[in-house]
Amino acid sequence: FQRQELKATFDTSTRFSKSCLKNVFSVILLFIYLLLMAVAIFLVYQTIADFREKLKHPVMSVSYKEVPTYDAPGIALFPGKAELLTCKHHFYDYIPPLVNPGQPGEIECLTETVNYTAPFTNETKKHAIIVEGPRDVKKRELVFMQFHLNETDQDFSAIDYLLFNSFQEFLSSPNKSEFMKVCESSYSSWKFSGGFRTWVKMSLVKTKEEDSRETVEFRQEISVVNYIERRTKAEGDQLFFVVFEWKDPFIQEVQDIVTANPWNMIALLCGVFLALFKAADFAKLSVKWMIKIRKRHLKRRSQILNHIS
Protein backbone atom coordinates (compact mmCIF):
# COMPACT_ATOMS: atom_id res chain seq x y z
CA PHE A 1 0.00 0.00 0.00
CA GLN A 2 2.87 2.40 0.76
CA ARG A 3 4.52 1.55 -2.62
CA GLN A 4 1.27 2.31 -4.43
CA GLU A 5 0.96 5.58 -2.56
CA LEU A 6 4.53 6.63 -3.45
CA LYS A 7 4.01 5.64 -7.09
CA ALA A 8 0.81 7.67 -7.25
CA THR A 9 2.54 10.66 -5.66
CA PHE A 10 5.43 10.38 -8.19
CA ASP A 11 3.02 10.19 -11.13
CA THR A 12 1.15 13.21 -9.80
CA SER A 13 4.30 15.32 -9.50
CA THR A 14 5.46 14.26 -12.96
CA ARG A 15 2.12 15.22 -14.50
CA PHE A 16 2.12 18.49 -12.56
CA SER A 17 5.60 19.40 -13.82
CA LYS A 18 4.57 18.62 -17.40
CA SER A 19 1.44 20.72 -17.02
CA CYS A 20 3.50 23.57 -15.57
CA LEU A 21 5.89 23.44 -18.51
CA LYS A 22 2.99 23.46 -20.96
CA ASN A 23 1.40 26.40 -19.16
CA VAL A 24 4.67 28.35 -19.09
CA PHE A 25 5.24 27.65 -22.77
CA SER A 26 1.70 28.77 -23.58
CA VAL A 27 2.15 31.99 -21.59
CA ILE A 28 5.42 32.72 -23.41
CA LEU A 29 3.72 32.15 -26.78
CA LEU A 30 0.87 34.39 -25.73
CA PHE A 31 3.25 37.21 -24.83
CA ILE A 32 5.11 36.75 -28.14
CA TYR A 33 1.89 37.08 -30.10
CA LEU A 34 0.85 40.09 -28.03
CA LEU A 35 4.19 41.66 -28.89
CA LEU A 36 3.64 40.89 -32.57
CA MET A 37 0.20 42.50 -32.35
CA ALA A 38 1.74 45.64 -30.86
CA VAL A 39 4.32 45.75 -33.67
CA ALA A 40 1.55 45.31 -36.26
CA ILE A 41 -0.47 48.17 -34.70
CA PHE A 42 2.62 50.38 -34.79
CA LEU A 43 3.17 49.52 -38.47
CA VAL A 44 -0.43 50.48 -39.26
CA TYR A 45 -0.01 53.83 -37.52
CA GLN A 46 3.34 54.49 -39.20
CA THR A 47 1.99 53.56 -42.65
CA ILE A 48 -0.98 55.92 -42.32
CA ALA A 49 1.27 58.72 -41.00
CA ASP A 50 3.73 58.28 -43.91
CA PHE A 51 0.88 58.27 -46.43
CA ARG A 52 -0.55 61.53 -45.03
CA GLU A 53 2.91 63.11 -45.01
CA LYS A 54 3.51 62.19 -48.67
CA LEU A 55 0.12 63.65 -49.60
CA LYS A 56 1.06 66.95 -47.94
CA HIS A 57 4.52 67.11 -49.53
CA PRO A 58 4.48 65.93 -53.17
CA VAL A 59 7.72 65.46 -55.07
CA MET A 60 8.61 67.84 -57.89
CA SER A 61 9.02 66.08 -61.23
CA VAL A 62 10.99 67.76 -64.02
CA SER A 63 10.89 66.52 -67.62
CA TYR A 64 12.05 67.97 -70.94
CA LYS A 65 10.03 67.98 -74.15
CA GLU A 66 11.84 68.55 -77.45
CA VAL A 67 10.07 70.68 -80.05
CA PRO A 68 11.13 71.57 -83.62
CA THR A 69 9.49 75.00 -83.44
CA TYR A 70 8.00 77.18 -80.73
CA ASP A 71 4.87 79.25 -80.76
CA ALA A 72 6.10 82.75 -81.45
CA PRO A 73 6.33 84.54 -78.10
CA GLY A 74 5.31 88.13 -77.67
CA ILE A 75 8.06 90.66 -76.93
CA ALA A 76 6.63 93.78 -75.30
CA LEU A 77 9.05 96.70 -75.36
CA PHE A 78 8.56 99.99 -73.52
CA PRO A 79 10.87 102.39 -75.39
CA GLY A 80 9.73 105.62 -73.77
CA LYS A 81 11.24 108.38 -75.90
CA ALA A 82 13.37 105.95 -77.89
CA GLU A 83 12.52 105.11 -81.52
CA LEU A 84 12.55 101.68 -83.13
CA LEU A 85 14.85 101.97 -86.15
CA THR A 86 15.16 98.41 -87.48
CA CYS A 87 13.76 94.98 -86.69
CA LYS A 88 14.76 91.89 -88.66
CA HIS A 89 14.73 88.11 -88.46
CA HIS A 90 18.04 86.32 -89.02
CA PHE A 91 19.09 82.67 -88.90
CA TYR A 92 22.00 80.55 -87.71
CA ASP A 93 23.24 83.14 -85.18
CA TYR A 94 24.42 85.44 -87.95
CA ILE A 95 23.82 89.18 -87.86
CA PRO A 96 25.05 91.16 -90.91
CA PRO A 97 27.25 94.22 -90.32
CA LEU A 98 25.37 97.38 -89.45
CA VAL A 99 24.52 99.75 -92.28
CA ASN A 100 23.99 103.39 -91.31
CA PRO A 101 23.59 102.80 -87.57
CA GLY A 102 21.37 105.38 -85.96
CA GLN A 103 19.30 105.86 -89.12
CA PRO A 104 15.82 104.42 -89.79
CA GLY A 105 15.93 101.14 -91.66
CA GLU A 106 13.69 98.23 -92.55
CA ILE A 107 11.19 96.85 -90.04
CA GLU A 108 10.49 93.32 -91.23
CA CYS A 109 9.00 92.05 -87.96
CA LEU A 110 5.32 91.90 -87.26
CA THR A 111 4.69 94.66 -84.71
CA GLU A 112 1.75 96.25 -82.89
CA THR A 113 1.56 99.35 -80.71
CA VAL A 114 -0.62 99.44 -77.60
CA ASN A 115 -1.44 102.23 -75.18
CA TYR A 116 -2.84 101.26 -71.79
CA THR A 117 -2.81 102.20 -68.13
CA ALA A 118 -0.51 100.43 -65.69
CA PRO A 119 -2.19 97.56 -63.80
CA PHE A 120 -1.10 98.74 -60.34
CA THR A 121 -1.47 102.53 -60.74
CA ASN A 122 -4.35 103.78 -62.87
CA GLU A 123 -2.68 107.16 -63.36
CA THR A 124 0.37 105.88 -65.28
CA LYS A 125 -0.02 105.69 -69.05
CA LYS A 126 2.16 103.21 -70.91
CA HIS A 127 3.15 102.87 -74.55
CA ALA A 128 4.30 99.43 -75.69
CA ILE A 129 5.60 98.01 -78.96
CA ILE A 130 4.68 94.34 -79.31
CA VAL A 131 7.00 92.34 -81.57
CA GLU A 132 6.57 88.77 -82.79
CA GLY A 133 9.39 86.63 -81.40
CA PRO A 134 11.40 83.87 -83.09
CA ARG A 135 9.93 80.44 -83.89
CA ASP A 136 12.38 78.11 -85.59
CA VAL A 137 14.82 76.87 -82.98
CA LYS A 138 16.43 74.32 -85.32
CA LYS A 139 17.58 77.07 -87.68
CA ARG A 140 18.55 79.29 -84.73
CA GLU A 141 16.17 82.03 -85.73
CA LEU A 142 16.72 85.33 -83.95
CA VAL A 143 15.13 88.77 -83.85
CA PHE A 144 17.50 91.74 -84.02
CA MET A 145 16.27 95.23 -83.09
CA GLN A 146 17.88 98.64 -83.01
CA PHE A 147 16.58 101.66 -81.07
CA HIS A 148 17.66 105.27 -81.07
CA LEU A 149 17.27 107.77 -78.24
CA ASN A 150 17.95 111.33 -79.35
CA GLU A 151 18.54 113.19 -76.11
CA THR A 152 17.88 112.37 -72.49
CA ASP A 153 18.23 114.23 -69.23
CA GLN A 154 18.78 110.99 -67.29
CA ASP A 155 22.14 109.70 -66.10
CA PHE A 156 21.39 106.13 -67.20
CA SER A 157 19.36 104.98 -70.18
CA ALA A 158 17.60 101.64 -70.56
CA ILE A 159 14.55 100.14 -72.26
CA ASP A 160 12.19 97.85 -70.38
CA TYR A 161 10.77 94.69 -71.95
CA LEU A 162 8.78 91.62 -70.98
CA LEU A 163 8.08 88.29 -72.64
CA PHE A 164 4.72 86.55 -72.77
CA ASN A 165 3.66 83.16 -74.04
CA SER A 166 1.95 83.68 -77.40
CA PHE A 167 1.98 86.54 -79.86
CA GLN A 168 -0.99 84.95 -81.66
CA GLU A 169 -3.08 85.16 -78.49
CA PHE A 170 -2.31 88.86 -78.34
CA LEU A 171 -3.42 89.36 -81.97
CA SER A 172 -6.65 87.45 -81.43
CA SER A 173 -7.46 89.26 -78.18
CA PRO A 174 -10.50 91.59 -78.53
CA ASN A 175 -9.12 93.96 -75.89
CA LYS A 176 -5.37 94.33 -76.36
CA SER A 177 -5.01 96.96 -73.65
CA GLU A 178 -6.53 94.67 -71.05
CA PHE A 179 -4.39 91.79 -72.37
CA MET A 180 -1.23 93.82 -71.77
CA LYS A 181 -2.35 94.79 -68.29
CA VAL A 182 -2.76 91.11 -67.43
CA CYS A 183 0.64 90.28 -68.96
CA GLU A 184 2.40 93.03 -67.03
CA SER A 185 0.89 91.83 -63.75
CA SER A 186 1.75 88.17 -64.51
CA TYR A 187 5.24 88.28 -66.08
CA SER A 188 8.51 89.76 -64.91
CA SER A 189 10.14 92.62 -66.79
CA TRP A 190 13.81 93.18 -67.66
CA LYS A 191 15.98 95.95 -69.10
CA PHE A 192 18.68 96.37 -71.73
CA SER A 193 21.04 99.33 -71.70
CA GLY A 194 22.12 101.75 -74.39
CA GLY A 195 25.57 101.53 -75.97
CA PHE A 196 25.55 97.71 -75.86
CA ARG A 197 24.31 94.77 -77.84
CA THR A 198 22.25 92.66 -75.44
CA TRP A 199 21.79 89.04 -76.53
CA VAL A 200 18.86 87.32 -74.82
CA LYS A 201 18.61 83.52 -75.02
CA MET A 202 15.19 82.35 -73.88
CA SER A 203 14.01 79.05 -72.43
CA LEU A 204 10.47 78.06 -71.57
CA VAL A 205 9.27 76.46 -68.32
CA LYS A 206 5.73 75.13 -67.99
CA THR A 207 4.51 74.39 -64.47
CA LYS A 208 1.36 72.38 -63.75
CA GLU A 209 -0.32 73.57 -60.57
CA GLU A 210 -2.31 71.45 -58.10
CA ASP A 211 -5.62 72.73 -59.54
CA SER A 212 -4.54 71.55 -63.04
CA ARG A 213 -3.79 75.09 -64.22
CA GLU A 214 -0.65 75.55 -66.32
CA THR A 215 1.63 78.54 -65.82
CA VAL A 216 4.38 79.63 -68.21
CA GLU A 217 7.67 81.18 -67.18
CA PHE A 218 10.52 82.52 -69.32
CA ARG A 219 14.10 82.05 -68.21
CA GLN A 220 16.88 84.01 -69.82
CA GLU A 221 20.61 83.92 -70.33
CA ILE A 222 21.86 87.41 -71.18
CA SER A 223 25.22 88.37 -72.63
CA VAL A 224 26.25 91.98 -73.21
CA VAL A 225 28.78 93.24 -75.77
CA ASN A 226 29.99 96.82 -76.00
CA TYR A 227 29.05 98.75 -79.15
CA ILE A 228 31.99 100.51 -80.81
CA GLU A 229 30.82 103.96 -81.84
CA ARG A 230 32.13 105.04 -85.26
CA ARG A 231 29.77 107.91 -86.01
CA THR A 232 31.28 111.37 -86.20
CA LYS A 233 28.28 113.19 -84.72
CA ALA A 234 27.02 111.11 -81.82
CA GLU A 235 26.83 113.64 -79.02
CA GLY A 236 23.76 113.41 -76.82
CA ASP A 237 22.09 110.42 -78.50
CA GLN A 238 22.16 106.73 -77.62
CA LEU A 239 21.82 103.52 -79.62
CA PHE A 240 20.28 100.31 -78.25
CA PHE A 241 20.79 96.87 -79.77
CA VAL A 242 18.96 93.76 -78.59
CA VAL A 243 18.76 90.18 -79.89
CA PHE A 244 16.17 87.56 -78.92
CA GLU A 245 16.79 83.86 -79.60
CA TRP A 246 15.72 80.50 -78.21
CA LYS A 247 18.41 78.80 -76.15
CA ASP A 248 17.55 75.19 -77.05
CA PRO A 249 14.62 73.10 -78.38
CA PHE A 250 13.65 71.74 -74.95
CA ILE A 251 10.62 72.88 -72.96
CA GLN A 252 10.99 72.20 -69.27
CA GLU A 253 7.82 70.75 -67.76
CA VAL A 254 7.45 70.83 -63.99
CA GLN A 255 4.69 69.17 -62.00
CA ASP A 256 4.14 67.87 -58.49
CA ILE A 257 3.77 64.10 -58.16
CA VAL A 258 2.35 62.36 -55.10
CA THR A 259 4.62 59.39 -54.45
CA ALA A 260 2.22 57.81 -51.96
CA ASN A 261 0.58 54.78 -53.59
CA PRO A 262 -2.79 54.00 -51.99
CA TRP A 263 -2.78 50.42 -53.33
CA ASN A 264 0.50 49.62 -51.57
CA MET A 265 -0.89 51.05 -48.35
CA ILE A 266 -4.14 49.06 -48.71
CA ALA A 267 -2.20 45.83 -49.35
CA LEU A 268 0.03 46.44 -46.33
CA LEU A 269 -2.95 47.24 -44.11
CA CYS A 270 -4.77 44.09 -45.26
CA GLY A 271 -1.71 42.00 -44.40
CA VAL A 272 -1.35 43.67 -41.00
CA PHE A 273 -5.03 43.26 -40.14
CA LEU A 274 -4.91 39.62 -41.25
CA ALA A 275 -1.93 39.07 -38.96
CA LEU A 276 -3.82 40.80 -36.13
CA PHE A 277 -6.85 38.56 -36.58
CA LYS A 278 -4.68 35.44 -36.73
CA ALA A 279 -2.79 36.50 -33.61
CA ALA A 280 -6.03 37.27 -31.77
CA ASP A 281 -7.48 33.92 -32.80
CA PHE A 282 -4.35 32.10 -31.66
CA ALA A 283 -4.34 33.98 -28.34
CA LYS A 284 -7.99 33.06 -27.81
CA LEU A 285 -7.32 29.37 -28.53
CA SER A 286 -4.25 29.44 -26.30
CA VAL A 287 -6.25 30.84 -23.38
CA LYS A 288 -8.98 28.26 -23.90
CA TRP A 289 -6.37 25.51 -24.06
CA MET A 290 -4.72 26.73 -20.85
CA ILE A 291 -8.08 26.82 -19.07
CA LYS A 292 -8.88 23.32 -20.32
CA ILE A 293 -5.49 21.98 -19.21
CA ARG A 294 -5.94 23.62 -15.81
CA LYS A 295 -9.38 22.09 -15.34
CA ARG A 296 -8.12 18.67 -16.45
CA HIS A 297 -5.19 18.91 -14.02
CA LEU A 298 -7.47 19.87 -11.14
CA LYS A 299 -9.84 17.01 -11.98
CA ARG A 300 -7.02 14.44 -12.08
CA ARG A 301 -5.60 15.76 -8.84
CA SER A 302 -8.94 15.48 -7.08
CA GLN A 303 -9.38 11.93 -8.45
CA ILE A 304 -5.93 10.91 -7.17
CA LEU A 305 -6.54 12.43 -3.76
CA ASN A 306 -9.88 10.66 -3.54
CA HIS A 307 -8.21 7.39 -4.53
CA ILE A 308 -5.46 7.86 -1.93
CA SER A 309 -7.92 8.76 0.76
Image: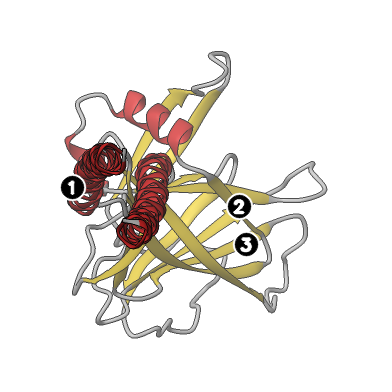
Reading the image, the residue beneath label 3 is 239
Q: Residue at x 52, y 49 (%)?
A: 83
Indicate which label's residue lies in the foreground, 1 or 3. 1
Please tell me which residue lies in front, 152 or 17.
17
Dot 2 alpha-carbon crowd within 10 angstroms: few under 14, some 14 to 19, many 20 or more: some
Looking at marks 2 and 3 on the same chain, the residue that comes earlier in the sequence is marked by: 2
| Above or below: residue 164 compared with residue 246 | above
**How many numbered badges does the structure rendering display?**
3
For the rendered model, the colour scheme is secondary structure
Looking at marks 1 and 3 on the same chain, the residue that comes earlier in the sequence is marked by: 3
Q: Are marks 2 and 3 in contact (CB under 8 Å)?
A: no
Q: Amino acid at mark 2?
A: Lys
Residue 284, x across and y down, in percent:
23, 39
Dot 3 alpha-carbon crowd within 10 angstroms: few under 14, some 14 to 19, many 20 or more: many
Residue 151, x across and y down, in percent:
71, 47
Q: Secondary structure at mark 2?
A: strand
Reading the image, the residue beneath label 2 is 191
Left or right of 224, for residue 127: left
Looking at marks 2 and 1 on the same chain, the residue that comes earlier in the sequence is marked by: 2
Residue 166, x across and y down, in percent:
26, 48
Q: Residue at x 29, y 74 (%)?
A: 249
> Which label sits on residue 274?
1
Q: Secondary structure at mark 3?
A: strand
Q: Residue at x 29, y 29 (%)?
A: 176
Left or right of 221, for residue 15: left
Left or right of 274, for residue 40: right
Q: CA distance from mark 2 to mark 3?
A: 14 Å
Q: CA distance from mark 2 to mark 1?
A: 66 Å
Q: Secondary structure at mark 1?
A: helix
Q: Amino acid at mark 3?
A: Leu
Residue 74 appears in the picture as rendered: no
Indicate which label's residue lies in the foreground, 2 or 3. 2
